[in-house]
Image (cartoon, rainbow, N blue to C red):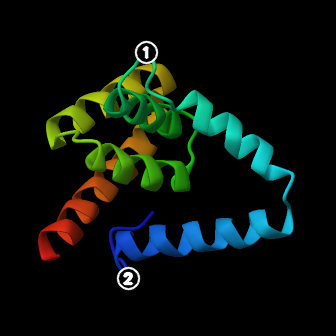
Amino acid sequence: MSTTHDHSKTQELADFKNTMNDFVAEAPEIKEFSAFVEGAEATNVIDHKTKELVSLAIGVAVRCDHCILWHTDAALDAGATHDEIVDVLKVAVVMGGGPALTYAVDAYDTLRALESDRAEN
């Protein structure tokens, strides 16, 4: 991810979600996976904010740009603070080493961009 944005991170996420919906419409088998995701993300034991922070950390550790964008946004929606997200990015670097550090920087950039997008709206 670059620090120079052609459009907002919010729009980038919306575009990705729309494309994902189009893909799922053409590959309905993926709905089974989506049902699993919904079940795994249920808040029966662990609260939603914590699950989003964990998902963000894993997204950084496995170096998934779209996961970082998706789960940073979802963590903010779930009430995560800037400091909580920065803290979880540190844990991701511990678990993922140097490569995760580069993605943690990308995630930090995403966090700042999403915060900026939200401040403008």
Q: Earlier in the sequence, mark 2 or mark 1?
A: 2
Identify residue for label 2.
7
- Which residue ends up furthest to the front in the rendered image? 44
Relative to 117, 6 lies left or right: right
What residue is shown at x 43% (from left), y 44% (from top)? 102
**Residue 90 vertical position relative to residue 23 in the rendered view, above or below:** above
> Residue 71: x, y in percent?
43, 46
Report the number of discs.
2
Local packing at callout 1 (Cα closer than 10 Å; few below 14, some 14-19, many 20+) is few
- Label 2–label 1 contact, CB within 8 A: no
Q: Secondary structure at mark 1?
A: loop
Q: Which mark is residue 98?
A: none
**Residue 91 vertical position relative to residue 58 in the rendered view, above or below:** above
The quadrant the C terminus occupies is bottom left
Relative to 14, 22 lies left or right: right
Give the camera-side residue of 74 and 32: 32
CA–CA distance in space, label 2 to label 1: 37 Å
> Residue 77: x, y in percent?
29, 50
Tag nearer the camera, 2 or 1: 1
Amino acid at circle 1: Val
Give the camera-side residue of 68 and 73: 73
Q: Which mark is residue 45?
A: 1
What residue is shown at x 38% (from left), y 42% (from top)? 104
Q: Secondary structure at mark 2?
A: loop
Amino acid at circle 2: His
What residue is shown at x 50% (from left), y 26% (from top)? 96
What residue is shown at x 76% (from left), y 63% (from top)? 24
Give the camera-side residue of 28 and 18: 28
> Residue 19: x, y in percent?
65, 73
The quadrant the N terminus occupies is bottom left
